[in-house]
Image (tube, rainbow, N blue to C red):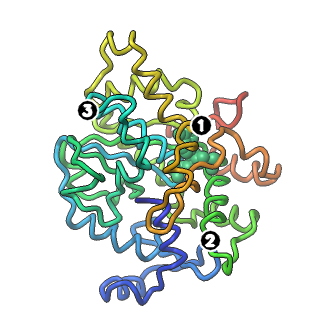
Amino acid sequence: MDTATTSKAEIASPIQDVDDELQQLLQTLPEEQGWVSGSSLYLYQGFWYAPHILKHAISCQRHFQASDSDVIVATSPKCGTTWLKALTFSTLYRNQFTRDESPLLTFNPHRLAPSLEYGVDLNNPCPGRVYKPRLFGTHIPYASLPASIKDSDCKIVYMCRNPMDMFISFWHFRDMLRDESKELLSLDEAFDKFCRGIYFSGPFFEHVLGYWKASRENPNKILFLKYEDLKEDISCQLKHLAMFLGVPFTEDEEKGGVVEEIANICSFEKLKELEVNKNGSQNGIPYKVFFRKGKVWDWSNYLTPSMVERLEKLIQEKLDKSGLTFKLSSKSSKP
Ligand code: A3P
């Protein structure tokens, strides 16, 4: 899985656990302290990784062979990975089970769309059965993706979220996962690191822009979605997703309410209340940490005016002329 394992690895994976090659590599990479005391992050190909994640990411770069039919859900952490995995899974395989038998009712979305860089068993990635086409997740930045993903006809669905909410979500996530004996950076300190790009999978803007540019060059291969747009009109975005994946909803499906059914089963309220997501866990990470508030613009409850000003400036500077904008509040549609 992804961010969950990431954080755990950052917390619990001492450097001596990783193999010799990685240890040698780490010695050559820039290092920074993570957001939780005792954790380290390493800069590899322009992005920050915890050691265990880096090990799997490199292995994935070297060995993963994409098929033309594969679907990859790509995100920065805390941008709605869990939601997008649930939606993509439910859309792709909707004819393989009835609504009452949806695997989402008994498995967390991270089990159904496992993340590539975590040593996935490619022959048996999902519990119980093998779904076709294959569906994977990843936080690997576009430039560092395995060549076979970029060169094959497999499809990538990328979802981003406005950086203010993403930051707040990530700070809480790290807090929920930390051992009691470890300390989390204050909001101020973490914010400074975030603005400097130092967190697992950061820098934020480079991650987003990598996929944004690639999606503009190749819109049939990469679909670029925004969390805020899904929150605003899930049915419209779901239809768009299904069309992109080559499995558009039929007229009968639309009339029969299939789109709404998928939106409903994947909704925050529904997923959060499922037994598996309330009490289940994977690799020691409770699934409940993936379901906090599920709201847009929660940042306004945490960020001070000077923090907002700093991030707004950064957004303008980084996204300048890119054509990419974020809706930062209900009033604005521009950075
Ligand atoms: P908040 O912390 O703002 O609540 P990721 O899945 O990439 O780890 O992102 C987690 C964020 O997505 C959390 O945001 C979480 O609450 C939210 N989320 C999880 N499931 C969701 C869903 N079905 N619909 C909307 N948001 C969801």
Label 2 Cα neighbours within 10 Å, binned few <14 / some 14-19 / many ≥20 = some
Instruction: Give the residue at mark 3.
Output: 96
The x, y position of residue 179, in whole percent, is 63, 75
Compared across the picture, whether 212 is left or right of 179 comes to left
Distance of mark 2 from mark 1, alpha carbons? Answer: 25 Å
Going 74% across and 63% down the picture, which residue do you hit?
187
Above or below 18: residue 124: above
Residue 320 visible to the viewer = no
Q: Residue at (64%, 54%) from the top-left corner?
A: 167
User: The residue under label 2 is which amino acid type?
Assistant: Arg
Near-viewer residue (169 or 287): 287
Of tags 3 and 2, the one toward the viewer is 3
The numbered dot on residue 178 is 2
Front residue (pair 238, 313): 238
Determine which of the numbered discs, if any, sits on residue 269 in the image: 1
Under mark 3, the amino acid is Gln
> In terms of secondary structure, where does tag 2 sit?
loop
Q: Is residue 1 left or right of residue 78?
A: left
As measured in the structure, the alpha-carbon distance from the residue carrying label 3 to the one carrying label 2 is 38 Å
Q: Are marks 3 and 1 in contact (CB under 8 Å)?
A: no
Check disc 1 and give the amino acid type. Glu
Rendered residue at 21%/41% (across/down): 133
Measured in 3D between alpha carbons, the distance from the residue under mark 3 to the one under mark 1, in whole angstroms, is 24 Å
Kindly tell me whether mark 3's CB lies below 8 Å from ligand 1.
no
Check disc 1 and report its element: helix, strand or loop: helix
Q: Give the mark nearer the N terminus: 2 vs 1.
A: 2
